[in-house]
Image (spheres, rainbow, N blue to C red):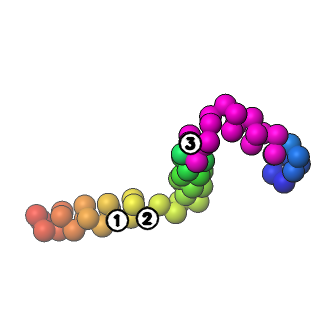
Amino acid sequence: MPFGISGPEVVVILIIALLLLGPKKLPEVGRSVGRGMREFKGALTGDNRDDDKELEEESGAYRARG
């Protein structure tokens, strides 16, 4: 597993998170962490489709004005 964490240690961490956050809040936190990790990975690899779309829109608007 990543960071040298074994299976039982992950289970203990999840149980503690469940006790601290509760069953209603835990899925929301998991989604937020997942989104953050996905955005971070995209920023590192340069795979950001939103930036490409914005650049295309800006260049298209510039050409229309020019």
Name which quarter of the figure residue 14 lies in.
top right
Task: Identify the magenta region.
Answer: 11-27
Label 2 CA crowd tier, 10 Å (few <14, some 14–19, many 20+): few
Left/right placement of residue 62 relative to residue 35 reads: left
- As drawn, the residue found furthest toward the top would be 20
Per the picture, the main secondary structure of the magenta-coloured stretch is helix
Label 3 CA crowd tier, 10 Å (few <14, some 14–19, many 20+): few
Of residue 52 and residue 27, the one placed in the foreground of this image is 27
Q: CA distance from mark 3 to mark 2?
A: 32 Å
Mark 3 in CB contact with mark 2 (< 8 angstroms): no
Q: CA distance from mark 1 to mark 2?
A: 6 Å
Q: Measuring from the top left, give residue 60's x and y in whole percent.
A: 22, 68
- Measured along the vertical axis of the image, is residue 13 above or below residue 47? above
- Residue at 10 percent of width and 64 percent of height: 65
Q: Is residue 53 magenta?
A: no
Q: Secondary structure at mark 2?
A: helix
Name the mark on residue 53: 1
- Residue at 82 percent of width and 40 percent of height: 12
- Measured along the vertical axis of the image, is residue 55 above or below residue 21? below
The residue type indicated by label 2 comes to Arg
Name which quarter of the figure residue 62 lies in.
bottom left
Mark 3, mark 1: which one is toward the viewer?
Answer: 3
Q: Secondary structure at mark 1?
A: helix
Mark 1 in CB contact with mark 2 (< 8 angstroms): yes
Q: Quadrant of the C terminus?
A: bottom left
Q: Measuring from the top left, give residue 18's x and y in whole percent.
A: 69, 39
Q: Report if residue 59 is visible in the image.
A: yes
Name the mark on residue 24: 3
Q: Measuring from the top left, give residue 31's x and y in whole percent.
A: 55, 50
Residue with the mark numbered 2: 49
- Residue at 58 percent of width and 59 percent of height: 45
Give the tally of numbered discs.
Answer: 3
